[in-house]
Amino acid sequence: MMYSQRILNTPSSFIRNILKVTSAEDVISFAGGLPNPISFPINALQETINKAIEAHGPKMFQYSTTEGYLPLRQYIADKYNNNFGLTIEPEDILITTGSQQALEMISQVLINKGEGIVVEEPGYLGALQAFSLTEPTFYPVELSEEGLNVEQLAQTLQNNPTIKFIYTVPNFQNPTGTTYTAENREAIYEVVKNYDVVLIEDDPYGELRWNGEKLPYIGAGRLENSVLLGSFSKIVTPGFRIGYMITKNKELLSHVNTAKQATDLHTNIFSQIVIHEYLTNNDLITHISKITDLYHTQASAMLEAIEKYFPKTVKYTKPDGGMFIWVTLEEGLSALDLFHKAMEEKVAFVPGDPFYTNKSNVNTLRLNYTNSSPEIIEEGIKRLGKILYEVTAKELV
Ligand code: PMP
């Protein structure tokens, strides 16, 4: 069988592959990226489902519109307008099968083979995978603790007129946990406004903040070609697969709508109605604070353990929210080598490689803390620290 270049060039998810070996019972895994089940309001959802079926009947089981359930789109518009002073209308919103689907569709709508996409380096590997299906050219721009390297972004846009869109995760980024500073956002806006490109702000983690104040978006509400992506995966349930795309660019939205018709006709209407009923009849703020309290405790346990057990040459991010810490080892060390050694000691993480478009054997890695108790976190980091001291000592001999 001859398969398409498109699929042959699309990497299969490294994480899904390594999760197969890291999910054994006795492995302490910081490799996953799953929300803690505490974030699933199961009892409330069960009650909601029964009530919703009574109230909506066959409508919940019938085909529905591609745009999505209007009351849910109205809820989302109100939420962003109240929280960020935006002027979003339901007509500006498309409900998608997770925000993942929006990533894939936007790429389908904008990219001809070989055309450019600016991505964060390191960046969300699910986005790199989704975009790869359209065979683009990736232009990675360095992500530091402040956000994107603005000078590099400006130069990249200047030198590469085929660039169609820029993909960013400005809050508690996956994989680094980094949040772009207010100054960095402003500087990015000042550059991007001069170009005919789409700016995607993918924000599934923004509400998972336990420290500091939320920041305004980079382009939402002021850039003509701004796209904001959101999701209920990290605050209610990923299993329902409910995400959304927001843009004031009607032409773009209508093309993505056509792509969605072709892909799956519409997002699961049962899930849309249930989630809308849940959101309007429960206290979401209290629910989210339960999640952030837990993640804060887990992140603090991990940061304290890193401080205590890792060699001082190791650098790491200190997130104010979200689900990840990004670790940078001494220059020359390979996180992939470390991964194999760590698996022998039954600790797992994701080596940095799959978060880059063109690098391998990198000295960076991702740690997830949302699925282990503080005690287990300390034990896992202690084991990693021991290996790190061993490999660092060997390197120095
Ligand atoms: N964007 C980012 C940055 C993510 O980390 C994820 C999930 N890991 C997604 C999008 C996809 O989320 P979903 O499709 O569940 O909304």
Image (cartoon, grey):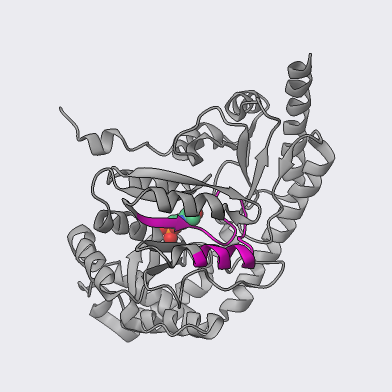
Residue reaching furthest to the top: 397
Q: Can the viewer see residue 83 in this picture? A: yes
Task: Identify the residue at horizontal 63%, vertical 72% (top origin).
Answer: 214
Q: Position of residue 323 (x, y in %)?
A: 61, 54
Q: Nearer the viewer, residue 188 or 181?
A: 188
Residue shown at 51%/29% (left/top)? 360
Give coordinates of residue 203: x percent, y percent. 50, 64
Tell me, yes or no, if residue 241 can be seen here. Answer: no
Give the quadrant of the C terminus.
Answer: top right
Check the image and report above or below for 63 versus 374: below
275 or 94, nearer to the observer = 94
Q: Position of residue 76 (x, y in %)?
A: 43, 79
Report the span colored magenta: 164-190
Q: Residue 187: within the magenta?
A: yes
Q: Residue at 64%, 26% (x, y): give it.
A: 338
Residue at far right of view: 308
- Per the image, is 361 magenta? no
- Taking 338 as reference, is 258 left or right? left
In the image, is 126 to the left or to the right of 1? right
User: Is the residue 316 above or below the residue 300 in the image?
Assistant: above
Position of 183 relative to 91 (above/below): above
Q: Residue furthest left?
A: 1
Residue at figure coordinates x 57%, y 41% from the top left: 31
30 or 261, which is in the foreground?
261
Residue 253 found in image quarter: bottom left
Whole-percent x, y for residue 198 in the image: 37, 63
Q: Is residue 333 left or right of residue 224?
A: right
Q: Quadrant for the N terminus, please.
A: top left
